[in-house]
Image (tube, grey):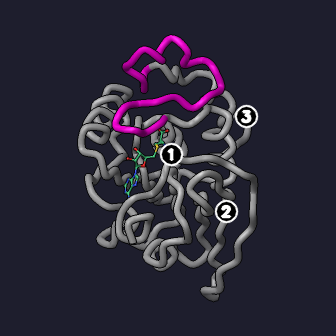
Amino acid sequence: MEREELYKFFKSLDRSLFMDNEYKEYAHCDNAFPIGYGQTISQPSLVYSMTEKLKLDKDLKVLEIGTGSGYQTAFLAEFAKEVYTVEIIRELSLKAQERLKKLGYDNVKFKIGDGSQGWPEHQPYDRIIVTAAAGRVPDPLVEQLKPGGRMIIPVGERSIQNLLLIEKKDDGTVVQENLEPVVFVELKGRYGWDR
Ligand code: SAH
């Protein structure tokens, strides 16, 4: 994924397409906004930097946890081969499915359910991105990451987290790096805050 291509796409993608409430008119602002059901659409600059850190390529398979509005999903679909995205709130997933279909993406598979357990049927994944915050890294996600793969996930307290970059080396060892402090809504489910 070339940086220029990502930047071009970032500028061309109208975020208001992923919003349908009174915040739509502020879609161009670099803020997170409510999308209903107590959830949020992330700020564009963060979606940009998380996508960049993933180092996507057109031959890679990506797992996304937290489809939300589908805004981040569009970046993944644009720069990866296949995207598997899991959302726990049915209504949000259905809306995201409609939006991404309208934009012409046919390389995204959607699941409604608990993504803290990953999506075992399609493992292993070259890349995993989690857009909700966990108290600790869910073991199933590390297991479903391919050797040589990378995962981005916010981990920490409910109020603030560290964005972690986790790399699984070819020999299976796992290393992690703290990228930056971030604030995400909580990851629910068995390996999230409901554990
Ligand atoms: N990337 C999204 C951000 C969505 S906010 C966007 O750009 O719009 C995080 C999302 O994670 C919410 O929609 C929330 O419902 C979802 N979520 C929380 N816990 C989850 C879980 N265990 N499995 C799947 N989705 C989950």
Instruction: Specify start and end residues of the magenta stretch as a single range.
Output: 17-40
On the image, the x and y values in percent for residue 127 come to 54, 62
Residue 186 x/y as whole percent: 48, 53
Residue type highlighted by circle 3: Glu
Q: Is residue 148 magenta?
A: no
Query: Is residue 33 or residue 165 the one in the foreground?
Result: 33
Q: Amino acid at mark 2?
A: Leu
| Contact? badges 3 and 2 (CB < 8 Å) | no
Q: Nearer the viewer, mark 2 or mark 1?
A: 2
- Answer few, some or many: residues within 10 Å of disc 3's Cα (few below 14, many 20 plus, some between 14 and 19): few
Q: Label 2 belongs to which residue?
A: 164
Could you tell me which secondary element the residue under label 3 belongs to?
helix
- Residue type, label 1: Leu
Question: What residue do we see at 51% from left, 23% from top?
Answer: 15
Q: Which tag, 1 or 3, sits closer to the chain's start?
A: 3
Q: Relative to 113, is 177 above or below?
A: below
Q: In the image, what residue occupies the spot 39% across and 18% down?
A: 21
Q: Which residue is mark 3?
A: 4
- Residue sitting at x 39%, y 72%: 195
Q: For mark 1, what is the residue?
A: 76
The span from disc 3 to disc 2 (Cα, nearest Å) is 24 Å
Residue 31 included in the magenta stretch of the image: yes
> Is 107 left or right of 129, judged from the image as shown?
left
| Quadrant of res 8 | top right
Mark nearer the N terminus (3 vs 2) = 3
Mark 2, Cα crowd under 10 Å, few <14 / some 14-19 / many 20+, is many
The answer to whether residue 111 is above or below residue 76 is: below
Look at the numbered disc 2 and give the secondary structure of its residue: strand
Whole-percent x and y of residue 90?
24, 44
Q: Nearer the viewer, mark 3 or mark 2?
A: 2
Estimate the spatial distance between the alpha carbons at disc 1 and disc 3, rounded to whole Å: 16 Å
